[in-house]
Image (spheres, coloured by chain):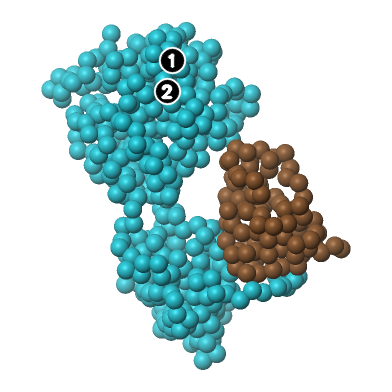
Chain colours: A cyan, B brown
Amino acid sequence: MTIPVGMTMTMLPAAAADRAVELLPGVHWVGALDPGLRTFDIILKTANGTSYNSYVVRGSAGVAVIDTVKENFSDTFFRRLESVADYGEIRAIVLNHLEPDHSGALPELLRRAPQAQLYISSRGQPMLKGLLHGDRLAYVPTQTGSSVDLGDRTLRFLQTPFLHWPDTQCTYLEEECALFSGDVFGCHFCDPRLFNDAVGDFRFSFEYYYAHIMRPFRAHVLEALDLIEPLPVKLIAPAHGPILRDAPKRYVARYRELSASGLKNEAADEKTLLVFYLSAYGSTRAMAEALAAGAEDAAGVRVSLYDIEGGEVAPFVDLIEEADGLAFGSPTINGDAVKPVWDLLSSLTAVNVRGKLGAAFGSYGWSGEAVPMVEDRLRGLKLRVPVKGVRARLIPTVEELGACRALGRELALHLTGRQESTVIDMAALA
Amino acid sequence: MPKAKVTFQDVGVTVTVPAGTRLIEVSEKVGAGITYGCREGECCTCLTKVVSGAEHLAAPSVLEEQVLKDNMAPRLHRLACQAQVLGGEIVVKPA
């Protein structure tokens, strides 16, 4: 027996009992609620917890289970699953994403339903091996367009890699126009009323989840939307948070909006170079100004200069996401770059900076570690750092300011593809 | 020791290297746009297009072959952390 759809808060919430909740005829939610969770994956706050959504789809030729739950919620998951299906009926287990909060109950499910075939993305094998040490665990690798036949129902796969792991995919129930979207369109919002037209206000959670989980992979979001937008969709069933049955396409459209550039770029096709600095006595500022002037002289690049002390991290991150080149100036204090520079650099994992041009510069008293440390961090963030940074002892000399101008010019030439071709011996790189 | 020439097309730098050098040993030092993740041939972050001279790179190992296949890499693409230069002239750029 299942709890009917449409209960309100004054009635028994849909997911309050350990039973499956019907979404569509023969399609049930069998997930778990985790209302006490306050931090997810270390980086995300969860003000009212989260849910681990799992679904069962019944066809005339068998049953499919889509995603499981975090391991310590397995008992609830199995009780709900048992309320709508026998283990012997399970023909397919689909994991849209192998992260432990969705694969935690998989080993036990496979033990209880050994005949079931496991379907994961072709990129999921390393994750399967790393998480479950399942070297010999049989699975069917999925592709966009490949499918599972459940008799009168078909599950078709869409590869949506890097949303937010390499293995992530969506599964589309064709006959019902229902999209099981994995983490895409999900959020950490726990509410036993389950459906987006019944739960509390979760708009902030939806946007917050996108900003932290999907934004670093914006280009991949756009590729996924190109696959999803043409589909007729009557219901989106994500792996976390409310099930989107009311105006589901609105959430698809919101992803399109969020994945567009947040800031209008007046520079249009012109390359952009952002120069960030901090300065105690004006030395690193003078270096920043010289670098910016050198880049301006080279023409073809729009240069912007920012004192980190006068700004906040979030808007700087928005600017950096859109920029082509980044230069960071930091004095060396106690053998390190200064904290506001690290605060900014440590915030860049929220956006994609891979392949941007990077450089560092700064004044120092006696050892000057900041510049190479920042260069290493930029390489770690997958920026390219083709031009060696400039350091100046205490107050920069005319020559050192000239080196900063030359650095700016070199960066501009690299940004515009006008750098000179050079031939060097590897020994010279040591 | 036999020498080879590797050109990193995106930064316009050609480096003369001894045979046996892996691309990873050079690309970061010249600031090429090839970026690295695990550096051990597993993550595919350093996928690199071989513009010319692919025959001058050592054949991919079984591990590299598998990673390229898992990530649906087009032909003439290699992992810069694995690809080893044998000789001749090679031109590469970020995938």
Density class for disc 1 (Cα within 10 Å; few <14, some 14-19, many ≥20) is: some
Residue flagged by tag 2: what amino acid is it?
Leu
- Report which residue position mark 1 lands on: A150
The quadrant holding residue A31 is top left
Q: Nearer the viewer, residue B66 or A175?
A: A175
Report the disc number at residue A155: 2
Tell me if A357 is positioned left or right of A309 in this view. right
Circles 2 and 1: CB atoms closer than 8 Å: yes
Q: For the point 72% across and 53% down, which residue is it?
A: B54
Residue B15 visible from this viewpoint: yes
**x%, y% of residue A83?**
34, 10
Q: Tell me the residue at 31%/61% (across/down).
A: A263
Which of the pair A23/A137 is nearer the observer? A23
Q: Which residue lies furthest to the left in this view?
A: A10
Circle 2 packing at 10 Å, graded few (<14), some (14-19), many (20+), is many
The picture places residue A250, in percent across and down from the top left corner, at 25, 39
Is A202 on the left-hand or right-hand side of A72? left
Front residue of A60/B22: it is A60
Q: In this view, does A408 lie above or below A210?
A: below
Q: Residue at x 51, y 40 (%)?
A: A166
Q: Is mark 2 on a helix, strand or loop?
A: strand
Q: Nearer the viewer, residue A249 or A287?
A: A249
Asked whether, in this view, residue B89 is left or right of residue A38, the answer is: right
Residue B69, given in percent of the width and then of the height, sits at: 63, 38
